[in-house]
Amino acid sequence: MQYLLQLLISGLAIGAIYGLIAMGFAVIYKSTGLVNFAQGEMTMITAYVAWTISTTVSGNVFVVAIGAILAAVVLGLVIERVVMRPMLGEPVFATVMVTIGLAVILRSAINFIWDAYPHGLDVGMGRGIAHLGGIGVRTGQIAVIVTLLLLLAAIWAFFRYSKIGVAMRAVAADDRTALLMGISAKKVHALAWAASSVISGIGGVFFALSYDLSPAMFQLGLKAFPATILGGLDAVLGSGLGGLLIGITENLAGGYIGSGTKEVAGFAMIIVVLMVRPFGIFGERDIERV
Amino acid sequence: MPTTLPTSTHAAATPQAVPERDCLLEFRNIRILYDNAIEAIRDVSIAVPDGGIVALLGSNGAGKSTLLKAMSGILYTEEGVIENGSVRFRGEDVHHLGPDELVRRGIVQVPEGRRVFAALTIDENLQMGGYTRTNAEARERRDRVFALFPRLHERRDQIAGYMSGGEQQMLAIGRALMTDPALLALDEPSLGLAPLIIDRIYEVIVRLRDELKMTVLLVEQNAQRALDIADYGYILETGRVVLDGPSKKLVANEDVQEFYLGISASGRKSLRDVKHYKRRKRWLS
């Protein structure tokens, strides 16, 4: 029982990180109709910037958090403006290929700007152990689960009640008609990239906090992608929950079946789910009527 | 309704203004190319006077929708460019403006096939129509739309994609009205709707002109219906205006009766006769 709880909690913690990155995928897909294959790399860069701030400016947790969020906003806006906007109106396939190219460039940028060694992000908290009913949990793990839940609630409210949130859904549904209503698709896309960069960047910083920082961190994107597919590409909240599911599945498979199955468990699960619900657990079925 | 923008008297004072009529919208000698090669519109001039309904008729591929796209500034999404001529609104050249600026100035169109945001609720669809307006303005406009289409009010929290075609058309018109337009363009509002529903939609269009003094540009294939309510009509064939005039004159025109209204002096005609007739009439080619 103790063992199971331990597995569940650490599964939730890593799952929350997947969930944050998966939400990053979903925010971009929902408002631009693109799958951004550079999501993991953007996550990694934000985490590296956070580490640089913590070692050069200040190790204070608030300074690092605000600095990382600002850096993520700038990163998202720059990528949208420089790389994605010229591709507006081009075929989706070509645009997605561009994100793959971008991923490779960002990945090598880590080695140019920083280095290839692993680092630990230390902000003076997050590595302590808290005891929950006899189970030791790192405070960073609790923090990431709480952050995910808070963000889920905030994003739900944003898409449901705010004018710009509804506009993002409208642009995703039919960008030309949105133009006819005077909605600026450019503004909506820029906002989506910035928001996506921040959300997944938070996941990256938490990962660096609980584990470590290395140029292989972009693989988090590959791990989070199944979570997005599982939850539904167009379902931001579903993607967050999908991340938790993948995290738990991985940990249970790794703990009970064998550590070799940990890597494949998530993917095995999405194959089964996609056979039953091709649009994901929380994805929207297309409404078809003429 | 025109509110703060300059009125036609102001337009008449400027040197480039059209002298004869109070034109709200005007296409002047416009030529539109797609992909820099395909000529969709050839030297077309169309005037839409303030406060009337102008019908733009023609068959598939005549260029009607292309003109509306040029008007709304979204030609670029289909690699289209205005190669020559201009689009003027209230006497001012507007063809270089972006779609959001055109909406702010009072031009809006209801696109062909309604194009409601299917996954959004009716309320959210209307909210998107009022995107360029402040929240207070949007709320006031929404009440007016609900007064015009009580059906939308009944179903306001429902998902738009699940409504019937007629209700979706009402929503598309209501959504366009949310922008507070001076000029409302409708691209084939009768497309795929039952005759009774078309009657309802057309009644609303007439009310918009008579009660709200709105200017309407009505694009239709259904010539009979459109000429019934329009004040003036243009007939477009393969990118050119082949005939124009007041609706009553157009309805009486022998060629229009022949090709668009399906009436002829010698009773029903076979398709072969029509083809032969078309070959004789140079202006139709």
Image: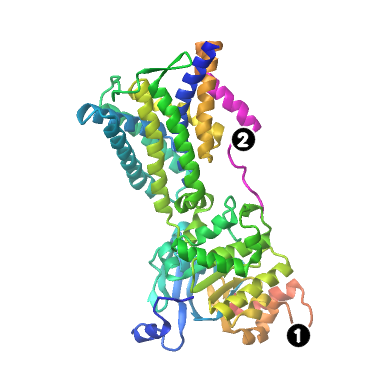
Return the residue at label 1: B265
In percent of width and height, residue B155 lies at 65, 57
Label 2 and label 1 in one chain:
no
Disc 1 on helix, strand or loop? loop
Which residues are drawn in magenta?
A: A264-290
Image position of B58 (left or right of A80) = right
**Left-right relation of A68 to B113:** left
Q: Chain of mark 2?
A: A
Q: Which mark is residue B170?
A: none
Q: Is residue A97 visible?
A: yes
Query: What amino acid type is highlighted by mark number 1?
Result: Ala
Q: Is residue B271 positioned above or below B118 on the image?
A: below
Q: Nearer the viewer, mark 2 or mark 1?
A: 2
In the foreground, A162 or A139: A139
Residue B7, position as x, y percentages in the image: 41, 81
Mark number, residue A278: 2
Residue A278 included in the magenta stretch of the image: yes
Amino acid identity at mark 2: Pro
Q: Position of residue B217 (x, y in %)?
A: 55, 74
**Up-down: is B182 above or below A139?**
below
Q: Does B39 lie within the magenta span? A: no
In the image, residue B175 sits, relative to residue B282, either above or below, namely: above
Q: Is residue A85 left or right of residue B220?
A: left
